[in-house]
Image (cartoon, helix red, strand yellow):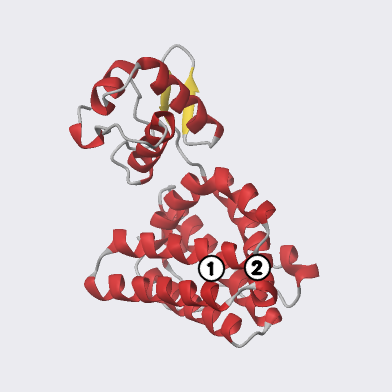
Amino acid sequence: MANRSLLIKRDTVPLRNKVVERLRSAICDQRLPQGSRLIERELCSMLGVSRTLVREALRQLEAEGLVSIIAHRGPAVATLDRDTAASIYEVRAVLEALAGRLFVERATDEHKRRLKSALSTMIDADRRGDAAGGLRGTARFYDALFAGARNDVIAAILRPLGGRIHLLRARSMSMPGRRSESLGEMRAILAAVLSNDAHKAWEACFKHVQNASLWALESFDQERPGLGERAATRPHGSSKAEASPAPATASRRKGRR
């Protein structure tokens, strides 16, 4: 388990925050795989910090759903199950669609510039075949979207889910055909907000999350005996979900076309 790449250099950033961020990144990047035990003394050695700081960080990550405390075994990296994933996507679809609509109503030119820049980063990463760079670009895109929506409650609700959202995003993007489809959806979001069409922005954001959900949940199904063949019958590249026609009915539109 030893990995000196996690070693923290001390600086002006609060050390506890750095420990949390370093462990969160290691989990999201799967350097600490799901289900693996988190042994305090080994983490102390890897990070170069005290056991107290490691314990505080593990409690924070437990609250975020990235760490589980297993009876008689101690902490381990949490395993994300299909039902939890589906619930996260249901919440994301509505909140991110709302963020898209609010972005149109409230964003400044600087917010729009940041959104365009993030999408350019994603496109460049895709051309290079840089999966990690693409994920970073996606995170930047959402940071810009939430900043432009100027609703701190949306960001506050989604922030504790950030680690699990990253894991699910990596899962869906690993499915053949999803990466190019996702870029098309992100282009549609950008086009909607730049045209100042709040309704289209809602629809584009909602559709993007719904499609991401279907791809990610399909990946779970392929891991379950008897379900992989059924999931594999869907032609890749086809449209997977329709956007909600209006906010009032967004949560009712489920299933595949």
**Is residue 55 placed above or below 198 in the rendered structure?**
above
Q: Position of residue 243 (x, y in %)?
A: 64, 75
Mark 1 crowdedness (10 Å alpha carbons): few <14, some 14-19, many ≥20:
many
Residue in the image at 36% along x and 16% along y: 51
Of 71 and 199, which appears nearest the observer? 199
Q: Which mark is residue 89?
A: none
Q: Position of residue 250 (x, y in %)?
A: 73, 67
Residue in the image at 47% along x and 72% along y: 114
| Residue corresponding to mark 1 | 211
**Is residue 69 placed above or below 217 in the rendered structure?**
above
Task: Decide if residue 111 is in sight here.
Answer: yes
Q: Position of residue 237 (x, y in %)?
A: 42, 78
* Badge nearest the viewer, 2 or 1: 2
Instruction: Identify residue type, mark 1.
Output: Asn
Q: Quadrant of the C terminus?
A: bottom right
* Rendered image quadrant of residue 160: top right
Q: Is residue 183 left or right of residue 86?
A: left
Q: Which mark is residue 97?
A: 2
Instruction: Identify residue type, mark 2.
Output: Ala
* Rendered image quadrant of residue 154: bottom right
Q: Quadrant of the N terminus?
A: top left
Q: Position of residue 130 (x, y in %)?
A: 25, 65
Q: Secondary structure at mark 1?
A: helix
Task: Decide if residue 255 is in sight here.
Answer: no
